[in-house]
Amino acid sequence: MKIENFYATVNGISLSCQQIIPEDVQPDAPTILMLHEALGTIRMWRDFPAKLATTTRHPVVVYERRGHGKSDPHAVGDIPRAIDFHNTESDVYLHGLITELGLAKPILFGHSDGATIALKYAARFPDNVTAVISEAAHVFVEDVTVTGITEAAKIYAQTDWKTKLQRHHFAQTDDVFRAWVDTWRQPDFRDWNMVDELANITCPLLVIQGDDDQFGSDEQVYTICAHTGGPVTKMLIKDCGHIPHFDQPDQVIKASLKHLGLAECVDG
């Protein structure tokens, strides 16, 4: 397996990236591009991207969004984020990264905010995506989401969570956290949703969520499945919280293989 860390410049911003190429990579296999959660980094995926690359035999690229990890920081005044920040992440940074890296119709694998951005991109650039795998996406704001974020803010203030996050975000740690909690708790953000865009998604879509997700309900899954414009498969995982690829990684990988037409890899 070949692992390469590098930087890509998109719209003048340096984004930290990692590419994983399995030893027996499939010729001409589309790249799986992974999009992290609101507090995520490359390292916080742990070994899941490598497992995904090995089992699918596809190249995998993971990147850190602006303001995260080793990528360039947010601009002064950008926190809280704008109500439509998912649009910027999709149209400017994700599209720019795909263009910069020359990725032909990648497979998007997103978690939480990263899954929402993946859905946005598939809706806005439907011809540019082979498939989407969505974990714990939000397409509208729920009370449970805001409650979970408010509780997270209390934990951050009262525990050593910041110290743990500093291993991943370094000097940007407070800004990363504020960009999440301050943005989602804006009164105007309660009206945000992207339901009307889902009909533009035409690629195959796998929608995954845990049955014990503290940041979203099953209604997110049902809404996505009811409104998307292409083939869609839902997967509600028992005994699973907000991070399915940690709580039930084998189930997520098996479902991903089936979704990508690689189910024979499970038996082989």
Image: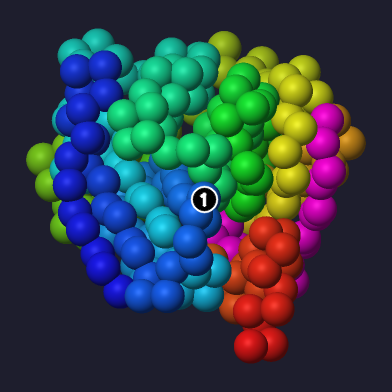
Taking the image as shown, residue 40 lies to the left or right of residue 263, namely left
Residue that mark 1 sits on: 30
Please provide the residue range marked out in magenta: 229-244
Residue placed most toward the observer, 217 or 229: 229
Quarter of the image where the C terminus is located? bottom right
Q: Mark yes or no: residue 45 visible.
A: yes
Number of marks in picture: 1
Residue visible at 67% across and 69% down in the picture: 262
Q: Position of residue 98 (x, y in %)?
A: 40, 33
Q: Mark yes or no: residue 143 visible.
A: no
Taking the image as shown, residue 54 lies to the left or right of residue 75, namely right
Give the secondary structure at mark 1.
loop
Q: Amino acid at mark 1?
A: Pro
In the image, farthest residue toward the right = 226
Residue visible at 60% across and 23% down in the picture: 125
Q: Position of residue 129 (x, y in %)?
A: 60, 36
Task: Using the image, determine if residue 12 lies above or below residue 241.
Answer: above
Quarter location, residue 89: top left
Q: Mark 1, residues whose alpha carbon is within 10 Å: few (<14), some, or many (≥20)?
A: some
Residue visible at 68% across and 31% down in the picture: 139
User: Does the magenta portion include 134?
Assistant: no
In the image, farthest residue toward the left = 171
Residue placed most toward the observer, 79 or 46: 46
Residue placed most toward the observer, 33 or 35: 33
Residue placed most toward the observer, 76 or 185: 76
Q: Position of residue 8 (x, y in %)?
A: 22, 35
Task: Using the image, determine if residue 18 lies above or below residue 256.
Answer: above
Residue visible at 21% across and 58% down in the picture: 4
Q: Position of residue 16 (x, y in %)?
A: 22, 42
